Amino acid sequence: MTSNGADKVMECFNVKRGETVLIVVDTDTPESIGESLFEAAGKSGCEVMKIIMLPRARHGEELPDSVAEAMKNADVVIAPTTKSLTHTQARINACKAGARVASMPGITQSMMSSGGMTADYNQVNAIAIELNRRLEKVKEVRVVTELGTDILFDVKGAAWMMDTGICHEPGSSANLPAGELYIAPEDANGVFVVDGSMSGFGILDSKLEFTVKDRYVTDIKGKQADRLVSMLDAVGKKGRNVAELGIGINPMARIIGNVLEDEKVGGTVHIAIGDNSTFGGDVIAGIHLDGIITEPRVFADGEEIVLSDYIK
């Protein structure tokens, strides 16, 4: 079953005979996942290499220089690492050098063959294009939930990004499982309540409430608040930057306690704090933590967008 998922990765990234494929894993990555990706790339007629490194301490922490350098010299980089390398300078520089990068942080054997990975990514791509068309000229986005979320984002002049799982062009990158639209807001004010899951915490058994003023989190409440504050304080004020507003658009994704899939669940919203330098933002923080919000209402310049009209 894992091999089926590995073959799908090769398909999504249009891996071709003669290309150089680098598999980046760490010592906590399930061995079968690295092996299945290695074998699938080999079947495609590629020159395949695998690098094993120590796990990073947090999402967005930079990689060893030797790994970062190897990534720049590959046509395709596939990274089923424990922590996400999406929001690292190593990933940015690899893409600048022309690599196509697949980031699959924390992926499990079951995720390789079920849920979000089984989506029709041509369908996901079509959803992304349609929703992006609706959002691309919007100046303000408001998110509201019955649990207390009421936050206003200034997105004027910022660009929405589409993570669709289709990654064929040199210098492109994607998560797998894929399926989201996301943006680095210019400003944010209000309150958001995370009730689904949170990076580093899994599925939440009680909500986390964040107060935001001028795009920075000023207060966090909830049972897990002290632990989260400690994580953010370790990197300083930039860790409290409201880095991202995202909308999940994968019809097959489910909340399972792994943010890689959770943030893609169709009809959810996620808000991330920390680094957004990798997708048009202005903060390099060395940390990027997503919180999933279920059953949101989304308003674009005052007009409600019914997400279920797009995600079917």
Image (tube, rainbow, N blue to C red):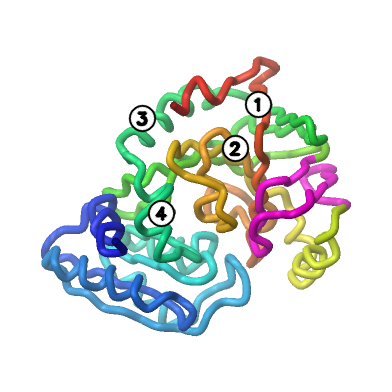
Q: Which residue is mark 1?
A: 298
Label 3 amino acid? Ala
Label 2 amino acid? Thr
Q: Which residues are magenta?
A: 192-219
Whether tag 1 and tag 3 are in contact, CB under 8 A, the answer is: no
Q: Which residue is mark 2?
A: 268
Question: For numbered disc 3, what is the local secondary structure?
Answer: helix
Few, some or many residues within 10 Å of mark 2 (<14, 14–19, 20+): many
Few, some or many residues within 10 Å of mark 3 (<14, 14–19, 20+): some
Q: Quadrant of the N terminus?
A: bottom left
- x, y percent for residue 280: 55, 47
Q: CA distance from mark 2 to mark 4?
A: 17 Å
Q: CA distance from mark 4 to mark 3?
A: 17 Å
Compare marks 1 and 3 and give the one earlier in the sequence. 3
Compare marks 1 and 4 and give the one earlier in the sequence. 4
Label 1 amino acid? Val
Q: CA distance from mark 1 to mark 2?
A: 10 Å
Compare marks 2 and 4 and give the one earlier in the sequence. 4
Compare marks 1 and 2 and give the one earlier in the sequence. 2
Q: Across the whole image, how many numbered discs are drawn on residues?
A: 4
Mark carried by residue 176: 4
Whether tag 1 and tag 2 are in contact, CB under 8 A, the answer is: no
Please name the residue shown 54% across and 60% down the image: 87
Is residue 200 highlighted in magenta? yes
Of marks 2 and 3, the one in the foreground: 2
Q: CA distance from mark 1 to mark 4?
A: 25 Å
